[in-house]
Image: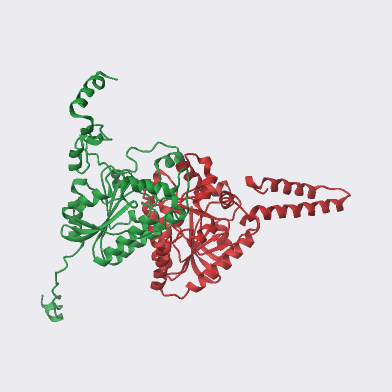
Amino acid sequence: MRNFLDFEKPLAELESKIDELRRMPGPEGLSIADEVSRLSEKADRQLRTLYAKLTPWQKTQVARHPDRPRALAYIAGLITDFMPLGGDRAFAEDAAIVGGLGRFRERPVMVLGTEKGTDTESRIKHNFGSARPEGYRKVRRLMELAGRYHLPILSFIDTSGAYPGIDAEARGQAEAIARSIEAGLAAPVPFVATVIGEGGSGGAIALGAADRVLMLEHSIYSVISPEGCASILWRDAASASVAAEALRLTADDLRRFDLVDAVIPEPLGGAHRAPDVMIASVGDALETALAPLLGQAPEALKARRREKFLAMGREGLS
Amino acid sequence: MSWLTEFVRPKIRTLLGRKDVPENLWHQCPACQQMIFQRDLEANLKVCMHCGHHMRATARERLNWTFDEGAYTLIDMPRVPQDPLRFRDQKRYSDRLKEARDKTKLDDAILVAHGQIGGHKAVVAAMDFNFMAGSMGAAVGEGIVAAARLAVLQKAPFIIYTSSGGARMQEGAISLMQMPRSIIATQMVKEAGLPFLVVLTDPTTGGVTASFAMLGDIQIAEPGALIGFAGARVIEQTVREKLPEGFQRSEYLYEHGIVDMIVNRAEMRATITRLIDMLVPPPAVVTEPPAPPPAANELATV
């Protein structure tokens, strides 16, 4: 069963009708086939128009789609010989952060990601992609490890944000995030980050202070969730769609402000409709982003990364 | 209405004349509810003399209290785009900025100054909570970068007083990018071998704590300050538990190993001076070249 978003309702009706017709036995098979192809074309057109002009709030929903490929799907599809590494060496292993050694197109790399999970069981295991301090401390440890062994870092970002819990605060959530950003900025190796779904605030940028930051077409990257922003500034979480608009959190917006480096187009109807196609094109985009970074001297890499961030936000929307 | 307000106050008012009694002559301590004479409160660095509660201070006051003889030079803040997103909630962001500027007489939520502390050159940045809750947008980020650059140029330690509700939502992802930007500033100072001291004051939360504010060489907190990443309400809604007593206060952070020390405002200047004294070597000292190592045969005879 496919999961449909609210705004996809007319499409959902069409598609279920098509399914029904397909399953219908009968002698007049030919006319059914005609009807099916007619409806399929209609559905396709509808999908195309719907996705050609998604509002920021609709994009937010696509970015959070339950069937959207997660960090582990990209790792499975793009990284061979993946060896997960665990723990922060101080307190615990945090499954909200996945990371380890592997090969990207033969080359050994360090892979990091925030993992939301794909079903109830795995979502609980990965804490819905919201990491605690030990998760960010693992990020830092693995980034430093990558630096010592000259391994490029690839990160996949998909999180609603760092976990807001009593335990997380007690163990220094803020410091852990700050150190993780610091480690990314200081990494003496090429670092490419990709926002594959939700880029939620500090928990996202903890894995995103990279040489190149890529965003999927329908992913979002924001300082606060639209709901959180709406409840503070509009005093009403129901104004989330208005807040999503105001925050300018879409991939196109971030690209326009030069806060990210490239936008990767998604298959029609979103990454979840053709995960293999999506994962393959992310692979190609990573290759393109990584190529000019390989072979750069560590100090030059770091200096350029710094300059890139220092230049950010000096220009507004003209 | 009590007999006091009905009978006594009108009498006093007529006696003194209404205009002679400024509204802010008396200040009520938010912690112990005692009334304090405003002038006494200011002389006591805005600390309640009854219960020791540290009230919030402006960026100006921080600078006045920190530098030798309260003398310092403010630096001009770099220009940043105003309202880059053309953000509008129930109010326009540009109007909010204007109101905040009128109210505080500040350009944004940070001041940067240089001068001397205990005879040492120093660069101090102070955030001001009165300016849009001390939120960090491009102006604050740029101010921190400018302060760090100045510290490196002057070979001076960098001290920052934080006070912030976090990132400035009205600048969207641009405010988020101030987290790495401000961290780069701390790296510049540290790489130059200069101390970076953070004084966390009430309140410091969100994207500010999760960036430069937690990366000091020394982390100092004022007593009772609210310091944390996530807001108390969000945490309560997430964990559906009552928050522990004193949660996210300076003392809680100290117990959990997150800050080095809690320092009363009255001792803040002296503490910063002592730290700089120990971390920054005096400039004019020429060290003697080390004595040549003893020859092997000398060692053998010892």
User: Left or right of B28: which side holds B240?
Assistant: right
Residue A237 at x, y = what percent? 51, 41
A103 lies left or right of B20: right
Tint applied to chain A in the drawing: red
Residue B14, given in percent of the width and then of the height, sits at 20, 25
Left or right: B23 as drawn, with respect to B141: left
Going 14% across and 69% down the picture, which residue do you hit? Answer: B284
The picture places residue A200, in percent across and down from the top left corner, at 48, 52
Please state if B279 lies on the left or on the right of B209 as rendered. Answer: left
The answer to whether residue B229 of the structure is visible from this angle is: no
A274 is higher (above) or lower (below) than B164: below
Which residue lies at the image location 45% right of the left edge and 39% below the top edge?
A: B237
Residue shown at 27% from the left, 63% from the top: B151
Q: Nearer the viewer, residue A291 or A276?
A: A291
Q: Is residue A30 above or below residue B252?
A: below
* Colour scheme of the picture: by chain
Quick check: can you spot residue A244? yes
The number of discs equals 0
Q: Nearer the viewer, residue A282 or B206?
A: B206
- What tint does the image give chain B? green
Q: Which of these two is toward me, B212 or A297?
A: B212
Question: Splitting the image into 4 quarters, where does residue B160 fall?
Answer: bottom left
Residue B115, by quadrant, is bottom left
Q: Picture coordinates of residue A179 (x, y %)?
A: 37, 58
